[in-house]
Image: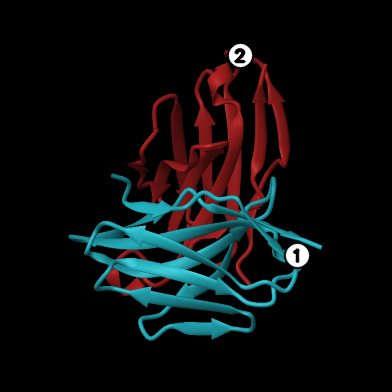
Amino acid sequence: DVKVTQSSRYLVKRTGEKVFLECVQDMDHENMFWYRQDPGLGLRLIYFSYDVKMKEKGDIPEGYSVSREKKERFSLILESASTNQTSMYLCASSLGTDNLYSNQPQHFGDGTRLSIL
Amino acid sequence: RKEVEQDPGPFNVPEGATVAFNCTYSNSASQSFFWYRQDCRKEPKLLMSVYSSGNEDGRFTAQLNRASQYISLLIRDSKLSDSATYLCVVNIYYTGGFKTIFGAGTRLFVKA
């Protein structure tokens, strides 16, 4: 079974702090993703990565950055946390990058509920 | 128009009922399809992939209609534990790769 582990289930931070959310997967997946999920808005893609040191902006990258120094680890960074970044953050991974792998689903971590005060 | 659209519901059904969800997609380059289940305050979990010929997993049946560009999920003999939000997911080809689009989800409440 694929295992995607997020470092924290619940996190409370203050406005202006730099926040790090960590995600690790154990299945040697090429692709890793960061989403946020808010009531009524569904899942929104922040950033994704298809290889070590590679990153691509998703639909809502503003206020965030990412780091992928090792294949199994993908970090999301809130450079200066703001209250509108209070949300559920979900990390996911999937196998393969080209069309041959398009039938591979994404697997999610448990999520991190982040509150910015 | 959203690339993937679902009826948000909620669907309220009694135990034992049969319930069906539809999901429409707008991009004809869509090639792979999935249904996920998400419980309240939990992460989405893969329920099943959707194959061209349709597929069944116990009480769950998924269908794909490429001509009309929709997929469906049928749940037979609903259980209380089926209460959740069901997400329709589509992988869309583009040159060099593909992207994944999640629907907003359909909420299901199964009542005793």
Residue denoted by label 2 = A15
Q: Picture quarter containing residue A95? A: bottom left
- Alpha-carbon distance for marks 2 and 1? 39 Å
Q: Colour of chain B?
A: cyan
**Which residue is painted at 67% across and 71% down in the image?**
B17
Q: Residue type at mark 1?
A: Ser
- Relative to A76, is B101 on the left or the right? left
Location of residue A39 in the rendering, given as x and y in whole percent from the top left corner: 57, 36
Residue denoted by label 1 = B81
Location of residue A64 in the rendering, given as x and y in whole percent from the top left corner: 45, 29
**Which residue is painted at 51% across and 49% down in the image?**
B8
Instruction: Specify the chain shown as red.
Output: A
- Relative to B67, is A20 on the left or the right? right
Q: Quadrant of the C terminus of chain B?
A: bottom right
Location of residue B47 in the rendering, given as x and y in whole percent from the top left corner: 58, 69
Location of residue A114 in the rendering, given as x and y in whole percent from the top left corner: 65, 31
Whether residue A105 appears in this view of the structure is no
What is the basis of the colouring in this image?
by chain
Q: Residue B14 carries which label?
A: none
Chain ID at mark 1: B
Q: What element carries label 1?
A: helix
